[in-house]
Image (cartoon, grey):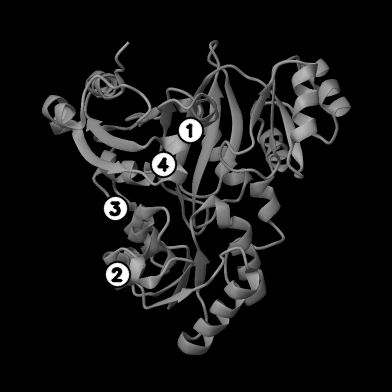
Amino acid sequence: MNFVFLSPHFPPNYKNFCRSLKAAGFNALGIGDAEFGDLDPELARSLAWYYKVSDMHNYEELREACRFFIEKFGAIDGIDSLNEYWLETEAALRTEFGIHGIKNDTIADIRRKSRMKLVFAAAGIPHARGAIVGSPAEAKAFAKEVYFPIIVKPDDGMGASFTYKLHDDAEVDSFFSEKPEREFIAEEFIAGDIVTFDGLAGRNGEIIFCTSHAYDQGVMEAVLADSHIYYYSLREIPADIEKAGRRLVEGFKVRERFFHFEFFRTKNGTLFALEVNIRPPGGFTLDMFNYSCDIDMYAVWARMMAGEEVRLDYARRYFCCYAGRKYRLPYRYSHEELLRLIGPLVVFYQELPPVLARAMGDCGYILRAEKLDDLLEAVRLIQSVNQ
């Protein structure tokens, strides 16, 4: 069996997917723009072949890489990066080479926020109103309907890139005078806490694994303020989140994919759907899956892709948290002091590449504890700043 993995070196923890593909019996075939000699040694050992391209955005190079793999190894059984950035590229390659999975005819349903809202409505889930806006007049008309502030973002965007909060007509005019040449959607602003429903769906849409996370603030807010962020997994999923999440797994026809559904929880308790991502949650959240339950979701995914009927017996034994730090802030405790104070709770620490730093921090800790209060106290120490 042959599985093509795009950009296997980034993010760094995704080397574990290639390790697991090899263990599941695949030839793991990497396509990337990094030099082979610069790959993590464990990743290099996991790959049956690595095809270096000069530019991952050059589709012709990716096409030639796939043709090379077919000639050398035979038919391609799967292709993925499990990274939102390459979703459309993967769909195009699957379409061209007849590979199982999401193709060109369905990719817009999981990429365009305007299309997501149609599924939210069909599933009967409250959601932020939105409209495609191509001019200041259209954005102002929408704001008159839902009231300022409004959020504008690319309809096919990812993360918090090119996301803006506009408070009045003047800011709308300023946005349109400088906006990139992309299609933007305007959404009503909903004040609330971000909560998620995350997991892995099997071949027939059955949920193999699921969990939920609560955030101290959204990625957009963290990026705009250049502040640190933390979020943690719950040991028990609130009933309304699980009900809404299961409806969306069905509504978006999630098959053999990870999913990451974001919601707002307002002060009165109402749950509003924000957006869906048919890929693993970002950062090190997949590792948090593993630490919270003492499982290996990288291996579970690879076994599923190999055709195994996977039934996962797991328990959410710990609250698990990611806490980032920004080097620009004067933290009260050094890394060494933190290890003395909360060392038993720390299961992972890593310096992050610059491309992730704006959202996730320059470095990050993963913690776990059976009691939420213990976890949140550790986060307080990590992010405590001298005044």
Q: Amino acid at mark 1?
A: Thr
> Does dot 3 land on a helix, a strand or a loop?
loop
Q: Quadrant of the N terminus?
A: bottom left
Which residue reaches farthest right? 137
Q: Which quadrant would residue 339 be assigned to in this image? A: top left
Q: Which residue is mark 2?
A: 23
Query: Which residue appears at 40% of the width and 60% of the height?
Result: 9
Q: Which quadrant would residue 97 be assigned to in this image? A: bottom right
Query: Which residue appears at 48% of the width and 66% of the height?
Result: 33
Query: Alpha carbon of mark 1 to alpha carbon of mark 3: how far?
Result: 20 Å
Q: Which residue is mark 1?
A: 196
Q: Is residue 364 above or below residue 312?
A: above
Q: Are marks 2 and 3 in contact (CB under 8 Å)?
A: no
Q: Is residue 131 visible?
A: no
Q: Is residue 74 left or right of residue 27?
A: right
Query: Which residue appears at 41% of the width and 53% of the height?
Result: 11
